[in-house]
Amino acid sequence: MAFSVNTNASALSALLNLNITTKDLEQTQTRINTGLRISSAKDNAAIFSIAQKLRADLRGYSAVKQSLDRSISTTDIALAAAGAISDLLIEMKEKSVAAADAGLDSTSRTALNEDFAALRDQITIIVANSEFNGTNLIDAGADAIVAITNPNATQTITIAHQNLTLGGGNVLITAAQTITTQTLAATALTQIDTTLANVNSVLTKLGAGGKSLESQRVFADKISDTIEVGIGNLVDANMAKESANLQSLQVKQQLGIQALSIANQAPQSILSLFGGG
């Protein structure tokens, strides 16, 4: 063993090992604090890059779910409105059939016409109130649903606009329609039958579109959960393992400090070489 006051190899070795232990301890503490085994590109550049891409996809699916939720709500309102209009048309048919009776007196026909007009006007009110988030699928406009279904916004589900206004594309009954005479009642009856068929067709289209949106919404939830679990598998820390490592490294650090202290005392033995006899 060489004795030197300039170089203490034991102390340098002890200090190196202590620094390594301290670095490992800091890394373990960071994992425990963040819950992440890989929290930056320095920990593992490749895995971190993959995790970041998955996080971007997860955020994208969050936007997808918002788009689908808005579309589902808009479709549900349109469906409810179309169903209500269909019910009104059935009642209007009943009034028209009664008014088409040749033996009906004018007073009764007038009363039927008042009921008919009240039902007719309700259609306009329902259509006007069938808006959600600025979108009305059944008014005289051209609003349509275009819901995104993937995080790149390259795939969509489209539900076309359906005009259910009085005198519109699907509703032959006009805002001035009456059943005050037998002839007018017969005409209204024919128009109501055609309108009912059209409205039922609209209900089928909206129902099918709504079901597609809901199915896609369920799928978006499932794939989001899968991505989130995948990210966790890549970067999450094993807390039980890190807890055990923490205790081990704390003990190792204390021993390292003691070893460094002992190594630093070694040069003191040189003084004994110069002691008096």
Image (cartoon, helix red, strand yellow):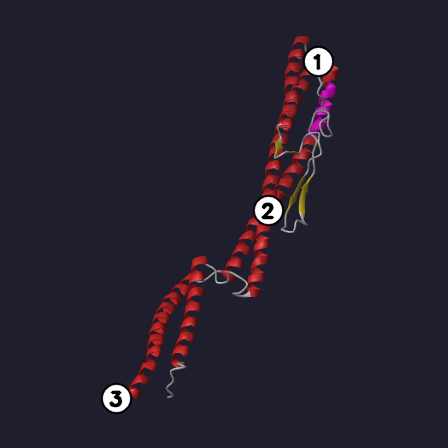
Contact between marks 2 and 3 (CB within 8 A): the answer is no
Q: Nearer the viewer, mark 1 or mark 2?
A: 2
Q: Nearer the viewer, mark 2 or mark 3?
A: 3
Q: Give residue 194's position: percent from left, percent from top.
A: 72, 28
Residue type at numbered disc 2: Ala
Whether residue 110 appears in this view of the structure is: yes
Asked whether 36 or 20 is in front, the reply is: 20
Category of crowding for the residue at label 2, using alpha-carbon neighbours closer than 10 angstroms: few (below 14), some (14–19), many (at least 20): some
Secondary structure beneath dot 3 equals loop
What label sits on residue 180 in the rendered view?
Answer: 1
Look at 72% across and 30% down and name the residue there: 170
Q: Nearer the viewer, mark 3 or mark 1?
A: 3
Asked whether 138 or 182 is in front, the reply is: 138
Q: Give residue 14's position: percent from left, percent from top.
A: 39, 76
Q: CA distance from mark 3 to mark 1?
A: 138 Å
Residues drawn in magenta: 186-197
- Find disc 2 in the rendering and name its residue: 63
Left or right: where 57 falls relative to 18? right
Q: Earlier in the sequence, mark 2 or mark 3?
A: 2
Residue 124 is drawn in which quadrant?
A: top right
Magenta-colored stretch includes residue 188: yes
- Find disc 3 in the rendering and name its residue: 276
Residue type at numbered disc 3: Gly
